[in-house]
Image (spheres, grey):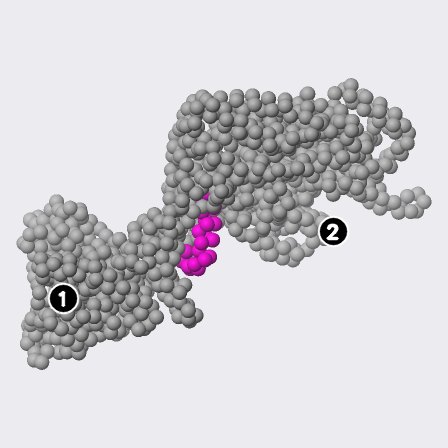
Amino acid sequence: MAADSEPESDVFEITDFTTASEWERFISKVEEVLNDWKLIGISSGKPLEKGVYTTGTWEEKSDKISFADFRFSITHHYLVQEASDKDGKEELVEDALPLSMQDLLCMNNDFPPRAHCLVRWYGLREFVIIAPASNHDAILSESKCNLLLSSISIALGNTGCQIPLFVQIHPKWRRMYVGECQGPGVRTDFEMVHLRKVPNQYTHLSGLLDIFKSKIGCPLTPLPPVSIAIRLTYILQDWQQYFWPQQPPDIDALVGGEVGGLEFGKLPFGACEDPISELHLATTWPHLTEGILVDNDVYSDLDPIQAPQWSVRVRKADNPQCLLGDFLTEFFKLCRRKESTDEILGRSTFEEDGKESADITHALSKLTEPAPVPIHRLSVTNMVHSAKKKIRKHRGVDESPLNNEVLSTILSFLFPDAAEKLTDGSETRPTTSRNNPPPESEEYNLYSQFKSAPSDSLTYKLALCLCMINFYHGGVKGVAHLWQEFVVEMRSRWEKNCLIPGLASGAPDLRCCLLHQKLQMLNCCIERKKARDEGKKAYTPDRSPSASSGDTGKAIDHSVGDYQKETEKEKGEVGKSWESWSDSEEEFFECLSDTEELKGNEQENGKKGGTKEGSKESANLKPEGRLHPHGKLTLLHPGEPLYIPITQEPAPMTEDLLEEQSEVLAKLGTSAEGAHLRARMQSACLLSDMESFKAANPGCCLEDFVRWYSPRDYIEEEVLDEKGNTVLKGELSARMKIPSNMWVEAWETAKPIPARRQRRLFDDTREAEKVLHYLAVQKPADLARHLLPCVIHAAVLKVKEEESLEDIPSVKKIIKQIISHSSKVLRFPNPEDKKLEEIIAHIMSAEATIARARSLKAKFGIDKCDQEEEKEDLERFVNCLVEQPEVSVIGAGRGAAGRIIHKLFVNAQTMTESSDEVAAMTTLDEEPKRSGSSDERRLNLGAVADFPPPAGRELILRTTVPRPAPYSKPLPQRMYSVITKEDFQLAGAFSADTTFF
Amino acid sequence: MVTLKLIVVGDSGVGKSSLLLRFTDDMFEPYLNPTIGVDFKVKKMVVDGNLVQLAIWDTAGQERFRTLTPSYYRGAQGVILVYDVTRKDTFAKLITWLNELEMYATRSNSVRMLVGNKIDKPDREVNKREGLQFARKHSMLFIETSAKTRDGVQCAFEEVVRKILQTPGLWDKDTQKCGVQLETAAHSEEDFCGGYCTLT
């Protein structure tokens, strides 16, 4: 070998590289890379354990090198091994064979289920490949190939690298590699043959043994025994007796009224086609010695049923069409639509609808108002809808994307209260959430992780409906249509004071998605407006005051129920004052016009006269707006019981409002003035409470207020009075006494005004309009973005539910990962599309896995299995099939699973035999002789054609013989061959002694 | 620069505003106006070489304001829960505050610190061990401080910030590396040729 280029001498000699050729430069590049990757020197490692090629991790690193202007990639593939222990080093003998050569003979990792082809052919644990960098380039000519081979030979020799180095030649798909491995005094050449058709004499063991022996050319007689490993692979494609059970859902059934809206609350699940396409059975004879069995062109001992090892892998259908996945993907696509609702439905539709509904609403309310028996409001909503539909029909606008039936089914699903006939005319409250406290389960609380909405909420249901409509009922048009109807319904509920069902009461839940918060906000507005209007309505002479006060009290503060008893005696007053409500002036929380107020007072005074306990001097300040006494506390000065006033609820806020507000507050800065201003801005609530307090407790002072509001700022001490008794003496805390303290300031400005006459802290009219506007301008894409978390939430629950039926550990793991991933992604505003796609892809893969497991269970007839033990074994086996690339069959052909597989093949065979026999025979004649054909014939001759001809025959032949001369060192020799329908490949590794030859 | 949001909560009069005033301005006033609603302070500091801007929301402790303040828990990476070591009742109320946090905090992994304040005062009612136990039970950081004497104040805030910086995904919005990698298995199948790629 020409190693001249190495400047190794210490002598001062001039080495001239100025004329270095491209070739030399290429070699030095290769050497450089090998050096960089530290692949130089004696390779060390432990003997390979059984199956480590499957269980271990494979890694690779690559670099680019070029020969002149031809670019190559050089890649190092290797099995990751723990750093070998130090004691291994000591064993290193100077002239030990390189590890790769030892690996050639190792039988622990034959036929790995998933590995690089070189690993499969040669059993190598690491190797380096030089291949053309571009997929279109190929080394075709023999001289180029030889040039590369000599290059690597030189590079290996120069560096002392013991790792096999391969060159890929011919187009990449042919997977042709030639290579070399060098050790001290030894060399292994890796050579290959790749043919389209198998020469007839090489289709069986005896022929291949002949090649192997002639290739070794061993001068010894008798030849040392050759060890043989054989694997035959059979493919089952025909599952005929098991048709795929899952049919795509019947769309028409959903449209039909009888199925009911319930279907809209569910997501579909499962594959529409068989997600398992093929079963590959590999029958293996792992360790045979030459002469043990016969396999030649007339007879074969290789009966798959007798094979000592069976393993199975399934081929999954590529992207099987799965319903849930399709639903999700389609819904996600909505997010990218640009059109607004108007553009989709035609510009004028929305306006007209709005007007129209307003008109009708008006008309209907005119009709209903004077009616002596109050018609339930919800039915009004229904009437509006049906009326609208009629009108639409009259106008001939029937091209609306959703037909009436579907629409009404959905609407009655979303708004079940509208369908219920409530005869007692009682209040409709958001029953779901209030009456049935939601289960505190982890699943239920998923919404706070996903920032979606509770699974029993309107928002969640809406998301599912939109998902369904998007898929089955008109796509984006249908979505726009339903949304428009939804917004109309929201407005009509606001106008009709009718609470929206399916939303938890109270302030918007900030853990939910913004849309949900908006709806909750609207509900807050409706609730307040309703309370106000009902208060006004309650002013009917025939109604008992106590009843009305009960109602209104509840509306104002829910906690009132707890104190009903205490308020009992007050009801008279409260009821009367509320009689005179008017909302003509919306400025006020609950407003009394001045005259009525006066009247009320007069009435009050006339009735009560001086009957009520209390001091005469406070007669002009009659207590108002009391909620209940505050324990046993009494006012400091008049000594009357201290009453907690009815107060205004603080304004509910959605997260966007809150964001705005905190931004404003933060903008005030951190200066003293800023802080002061900030406090002042937020003191509205404090002031309002003070006013209510003053109204409820005539003659009170700040100390009284503080005792209720901030009890720690009233400090009581036991002191001895002049008579020697201990008495409690209290005073405001020092900080409350700070002059110009905002509390004192507020107290001084506060007038005794009960909550209902105060300026409203929360302008429900304005807020409701804001929400309604917000809803109206949402495009379908916005909507999809709002609701995607709900849909993902629902999908995860669905997958979870389906998984629990099958119990697949890997899916459990995926679900966990999906949840943790989603809760990270969805919590931030505007998550990236890529991440959302990832989540959806994971859900789809979980779905596909479950579908596969189901398909396999059906195929292996697990449900039909009677024996408990056998059933368990089978279940375990099927689960492994889903999760592992290849599963060995316990008991091979005689085990429970083996028998079933055998039967599957037999069934498939009899079908093909009986129907296609004639056809098969004719094609056989036409076709030139091929691997399959001879097998087929043989099997046909043998009468027992339980299995089809093997789709693949793999053989590994191994031996250790001296080469090339009888006095050479005995070295490992190996040949791998594979015969498939279209390919015949031989891969040989032949070692030779380079010292004694 | 990293901007972090902290929120200080706890019963009225435990010294939340004083603690904050000591931390941001290194001042102490024996009597501060009772906070109304929420107040806001900003402070820049360097923790482990990271320049951090803290936006700290100070809240009112009064029951009545409690309906207002939870809104500010949103997005806070750190929560400082304060009680007064001289008043047992403020310690007993901690659990209510924690429940509230559970309800409203939007980040499940936000850092929580328990602070026992006013240790300069003689009439202690809650000893350190109790505080420690509570913090351990609810996996929080714990420290005792005195806004008056400066003890522990700086340290408390620093520790919270340090912990936030150490918590992955809490302050760095790009969580790309945190995401799960499920695809690896799928890809490798293509790179390696299985038994019969040519067949199948």
Instruction: Tell me the residue at 41%/54% (across/down).
Output: A814
User: Label 1, on which residue?
Assistant: A937
- The chain under label 2 reads B
Q: Is mark 1 on a helix, strand or loop?
A: helix
In the picture, measured across the screen, residue A702 lies left or right of residue A803, that is: right
In the picture, measured across the screen, residue A409 lies left or right of residue A276, that is: right
Q: Which of A626 and A89 is in front in this view?
A: A626
Q: Quadrant of the C terminus of chain B?
A: bottom left
Q: Residue A838, percent across and down?
A: 38, 46
Give the amino acid at mark 2: Asp
Q: Residue A123, percent across and down?
A: 22, 66
Q: What is the residue that sits farthest to the bottom in this orientation?
A: A222
In the picture, measured across the screen, residue A831 lies left or right of residue A385, that is: left
Instruction: Tell me the residue at 20%/75% (across/down).
Output: A288
Placement of A582 over or under A648, stated as above or below: above
Q: Is mark 2 on a helix, strand or loop?
A: loop
Question: Magenta region, mostly helix, strand or loop?
Answer: helix
Q: Which of A408 and A748 is in front in this view?
A: A408
Give the amino acid at mark 1: Arg
Q: Quadrant of residue A710?
A: top right
Work out whether residue A598 can be spotted: yes
Task: Please provide the residue range marked out in magenta.
Answer: A790-811
User: Label 2, on which residue?
Assistant: B123
Q: Badge 2: how crowded within 10 Å, few (<14), some, or many (20+)? A: few
Q: Nearer the viewer, residue A8 or A851?
A: A851
Q: Residue A157, percent across and down?
A: 13, 62
